[in-house]
Image (cartoon, rainbow, N blue to C red):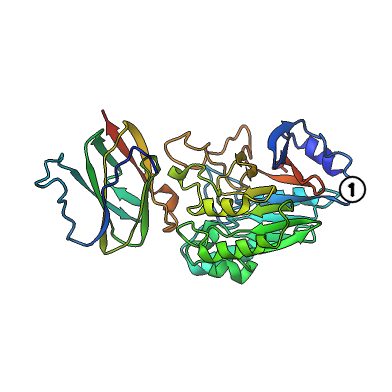
Amino acid sequence: MHRRDFIKLAGLGGVVFASGLGVKVLGAGGPSDGRTSPDEFYFVQLSDTHWGFDGPSINPDSQGTLKKAVAAVNTLDEQPDFVVFTGDLTHITEDRQARRDRMAQFHDIAGALKAKTVRFMAGEHDASLDRGEAYQEFFGELNYTFDHKGVHFVVIDNVSDPSALVGEAQLKWLQSDLGRLKKDAPIVVLTHRPLFDLYPQWDWTTRDGTAVINALMPYKNVTVFYGHIHQEHHFMTGHIAHHAAKSLMFPLPAPGSTPKRAPLPWDASAPYKGLGFRDVEADVRKARFEIAELAVSKT
Amino acid sequence: MNSFLRIALVAFLTAGLAVSTAGIGSGAPKEKVIKLTAKKFEYSPAEITVKKGEPVVIEVSSEDVKHGFTLPDFGIRTDIKPGSVNRISFTPDKAGRFAFACDVFCGAGHEEMSGTLIVTE
């Protein structure tokens, strides 16, 4: 099956076109069809898989949802250049050994991805109780950069400090990294929590996220992909676009829409509703990204 | 921070020494003092009711590990460390129900650790 055909069959809500200039929703199968330029590539973002979560009324297929998503990515005949998991790979446990067991199991499941490159990031469920000790044993550094076909990717850790701080040391590291880039360089930031105050009443923020955004602001082409809030969400801070991804375990309510940020219950009439992952098409020359939200299949 | 907010004092005192002295001999309205205890994974009391325009001191303490207290609608947050009492003084300038929550990741039930400040007219 061709990837675009897959996207259409998946019954997606549409393709979000994102750039430093704004966000608008286009029809599925839109401008990304026919990508042929070497300046174009795509990656897949999966997020908030919460491996180890157990709550039959929330997700009766907690053992199968991630595996289904992995299988769905593998069905794409054109594999992504890489897959990235944007945090909360595992569900929190205060048992040190159980935490490691969950990470080992998650690592094995993610290992079934056909994509040649899989990148990981921590969420607070993975890293906040031990400042990322177990996470680093399995997945490596908490913050790092990489370059891919002209795009500079920066992975920012805003979870291993339990106070949701990026911290002075990492801020200096970020400023040093950005300092060697041209102001019009395409930059993608991957992080777990929102860098802006999305809804601090539910801890949907990064306490010193404004300092990160201020460091990024001089750069013309910056896009942020993150997780944490278990739903699709798009927001602009100035010219910087922020895109939150869905979870692969349970959806959460819209910010402030309910008294508590409790997981939304499973809808038997619409299994996997609110869950999913995304395909991100990069047009490097134009420094823009198209996002296609993909559903989790029943099979 | 909310520009209308008057945060008079956020001070660390040793446990057992938290005494409200504001207003004594000053002619200012006496503060309402509310003790708030944090422990995994709840606040006690989980609901606090105060009156709009009435000065309030919330004395927060932890019974176990480090927690946080954030009340974003009034621009208030502080860490809560075991063995100390934090005094948060402010005068609510708007009525309604406002969520407060722990913003220091404290364990498996962290995300349920929240409460409500009710400000009446």
Asked if one can make out residue A143 in the rendered structure from this viewpoint, the answer is no
Residue at (47, 53) in percent of width and height: A207
- Residue A21, given in percent of the width and then of the height, sits at 70, 38
Q: Pick whichever, B116 or A39, lies toward us.
A: A39
Left or right, B94 with reference to A69: left
Image position, residue B100 (x, y; %): 37, 44
Residue at 60% across / 69% down in the picture?
Answer: A136
Q: Is residue A71 visible?
A: yes
Residue A197 position (above or below residue A126): above
Q: Is residue A165 left or right of residue A186?
A: left
- Identify the residue at image location x=42%, y=56%: B104
Tell me the element at label 1. loop
Quarter of the image with the C terminus of chain A is top right
Residue A220 vs A30, above or below: the answer is below
Q: Furthest residue to the left?
A: B25
Q: Quadrant of residue A242?
A: top right
Residue B24 lies, in percent from the top left, at 11, 47
Question: What's the chain of the residue with tag 1?
Answer: A
Query: Where's the N terminus of chain A, which quadrant?
Result: top right
Kind of residue indicated by mark 1: Ser
Residue at screen point 69% across, 50% down? A45
- Residue extending furthest top? B121
**In the displayed structure, does residue A297 sit left or right of residue A199?**
right
Q: Position of residue A88 (x, y in %)?
A: 57, 55
Q: Which residue is mark 1?
A: A37
The residue lying toward the viewer, choosing from A9 and A253, is A253
Mark 1 neighbour density, 10 Å: few (under 14) some (14–19) many (20 or more):
few
